[in-house]
Image (tube, helix red, strand yellow):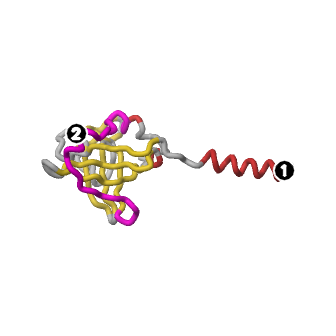
Amino acid sequence: MKIKLIIFLVIFSLFSFSQQPKWDVGYIYFDESDPETYLSNIDGPIADEVLVVINGNRYSKLNKYRKYPVKDLLVFRIYDEIFTYDKNQKHTTDTLSASLLDDIPFLGDEFIKENSWNLGKSGMFKKLYIIEKFSQDKIIRTQVRWVYVTQ
């Protein structure tokens, strides 16, 4: 009887804890030229200009969209959220026609903000893409992973 219970619990655990993506594909528009800024309380090299200190927390003015390389990663930041393209994984990058922009269902800022503390956000989508306008007639589609970071 105990063996059957143990087997049941093991199988139940495997099914319960296996994370199935909620959606197949997600698209996020990324516009590094957008002048929108926000106040962030992140410390470190990206937050070198302290604007104000409130209750001991330092706040810096940052651009909404930021992109920079870190070793084999290309890091995309939208607000304080981190999305990474890993050259060593099976992530893909494609150049596509800009005419596709009108047909892409982008995830909005609200979706990103609402899921910022979601521990399972890296597994919410089977594939997640950052879309950047490269030129008047071309866009770049970069497969990324949404990274959970503690502050």
Residue flagged by tag 2: what amino acid is it?
Answer: Thr
- Label 2: element kind: strand
In terms of depth relative to the viewer, which is nearer, 140 or 58?
140
Picture coordinates of residue 135, whole percent (x, y): 14, 51
Residue shown at 80%/48% (left/top)? Answer: 5
User: Badge 2 is on which residue?
Assistant: 37
Image spot of residue 75 (x, y percent)? 31, 55
Q: Report the residue that reaches farthest toward the right.
A: 1
Taking the magenta stretch, the answer to whether it contains residue 96 is yes
Magenta range: 87-113
Q: Is residue 50 visible?
A: no
Q: Between disc 2 and disc 1, whose residue precedes?
A: 1
Residue denoted by label 1 = 2
Q: Residues within 10 Å of mark 1 (few under 14, many from 20)?
A: few
Instruction: Specify few, some or many for label 2: CA neighbours under 10 Å numbering under 14, 14-19, or 20 or more.
Output: few
Task: Name the residue located 17 percent from the left edge and 46 percent from the top edge.
Answer: 33
Left or right relative to 26: residue 19: right
